[in-house]
Amino acid sequence: MSRAFYVTTPIYYVNDVPHIGHAYTTLAADVLARYRRLKGYEVFFLTGTDEHGQKVEKAANAAGETPQELADRVMKRFQALWEKLDISYTDFIRTTQERHKKGVSKIFKDVMEKGDIYLGEYEDWYCTPCETFWTETQLIDYKCPDCNRPTEKLKEESYFFRMSKYQEQLLAHIEANPDFIQPKSRRNEIISFVKEGLRDLSVSRTTFSWGIPVPGNDKHIIYVWFDALANYITALGYPEESGNFDKFWPVDAHLIGKDILRFHAVYWPTFLMAAGLPLPKKVFAHGWWTIEGQKMSKSLQNVVEPNMLVEKYGVDAVRYFLLREVPFGLDGDFSHSALVHRINSDLANDLGNLLNRSTAMLNKYFGGTVQAPADLTDMDLAYQEKTREMVRQVDMHLEELAFSKALQAIWEVVSAGNKYIDETAPWTLAKDPVQKERLATVMYCLLESQRIVYQLVSAFMPQTAVKALSYLGVTDAPNENGLRWGGLESGTQVTKAEALFPRIEEKAE
Ligand code: MSP
């Protein structure tokens, strides 16, 4: 039986165009999906768009189109970007799809019938841009504590979800499952939040109409977060519990930004408890990117447009940079100079150069044909062991979503490779016919280590890996067997590699 792995990104609002923050979460999810596929898992990788709610309704009005037209137009921009970034999603869910609406109505109805959703009256401070109600004590100068924009006092009939009822159960779950909310600092925030007490949550609105009506009372629209969060199961066919739902739920990892953690670590689990469904195995909140030291915002016009980055630097350089530069979970700063520096040093100098040197030497000394290795010396064995250790390290780091550490572990072997060349000095061995066997062995170790490096690199930089592997004469798609030392067969024809990453003039940037 094959093992299953389910990973999700948030579904993105269609009232904004895709930027580097969206690209970041989606890339991280893509790396996990690719890595698990390589390991032989059956992977379900879900992304999509969040198309309901007042913000979308307002944006559509402002643009002179219907909300559906707006959603149709903007979601295409997300899909086009994912294609450009080589995102290997399994399914793209839109909250305006029938399958989703059907599922949401069903869950709402089930929870209502159980008595955990009831009709009441609401009076509180509402922040429209954040679609969030706040109590008076949470406001800062009567402004939204999240976005600092004015709030308005709203009184309306509303359905409420009995979130208070699940406070203890949620707390117990968080405490019994240390990996449920990550990173740790965020987990602690959520624990304090829950301990302060959960109030019942308003889960319907009557102030706008773009959304899914409450079953049996269509004056009310289901709260956009109740609607949106359910995408993670409606995409699996829920309420149908056989098939994908059975295979993939509970999800292995919900990847999200830190700003939407409370929705995923408090609201969503309590909704699931009420619906009698298992909770996600992991919710991981990553940090935020600033741009050249500043908060990214439309008004500052410093929004980093991922399409432009890909055109300028290439897709794999962008993929590498975003996951290497900043530990997942911490905030980070995007700058063009940091990106160019990474391209020149890590990609051109270290990675590309190693492949270049080794394939060129094999061509010069053996006409490009891989020779069977003789006995390995201590130096060879150390290099082989480092390569094996990398495979274990990458596995462990990716289990913890430590993308940057996984890449560091790979680059240690890349550096070891460059050092191995300097220490074995193949050009000296080549001068002495007696050393021919030794030279063959050195070349074998060099190429074999890199073959394994590129199996792992394929999760991060798929196009680069395909290119490099084809220079190495490997035609099989990266796979688990390929991670074992010894896969490179003697007789394989290796081509002299061109520069994988041409250097970029730093000054020009
Ligand atoms: N629609 C909701 C999510 C519903 S999920 C059931 C939403 N959408 S969003 O489009 O506003 O944001 C999506 C993601 O982008 C969030 O995870 C958010 O953290 C992330 N980012 C937005 N700006 C960001 C940065 N500057 N840096 C990193 N990520 C950022 O919220």
Image (spheres, rainbow, N blue to C red):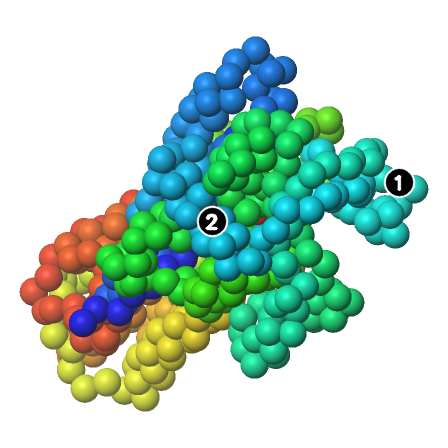
- Position of 54 relative to 347 (above/below): above
> Of the numbered discs in the image, which one, if any, rests on residue 109?
2
Q: Is residue 197 left or right of residue 205?
A: right
> Of the numbered discs in the image, which one, if any, rests on residue 142?
1
* Along the viewing direction, whichever of 433 and 303 lies nearer the viewer: 303
Query: Residue at left 40%, top 53%?
Result: 233
Q: Earlier in the sequence, mark 1 or mark 2?
A: 2
Query: Residue at left 78%, top 47%?
Result: 134
Residue extending furthest top? 64
For label 2, the SS is helix
* Crowd band around label 1 with a 10 angstrom C-alpha radius: few (<14), some (14–19), many (20+): some
- Position of 28 relative to 419 (above/below): above
Asked whether mark 1 and ligand 1 are closer than 8 Å, the reply comes as: no
Query: Residue at left 60%, top 70%?
Result: 170
Regarding residue 180, the answer to whether it shows in the image is: yes
Disc 1/disc 2 C-alpha distance (Å)? 35 Å
Q: Is residue 326 left or right of residue 47?
A: right
Q: Which of the four quarters of the rendered structure image does ligand 1 lie in?
A: top right
Dividing the image into 4 quarters, which one contains the C terminus? top right
Asked whether mark 2 and ligand 1 are closer than 8 Å, the reply comes as: no
- Whole-percent x, y for residue 84 in the image: 38, 35
For label 1, the SS is loop
User: Could you tell me the amino acid type at mark 2?
Assistant: Lys
* Along the viewing direction, whichever of 65 and 462 lies nearer the viewer: 65
User: Could you tell me the amino acid type at mark 1?
Assistant: Tyr
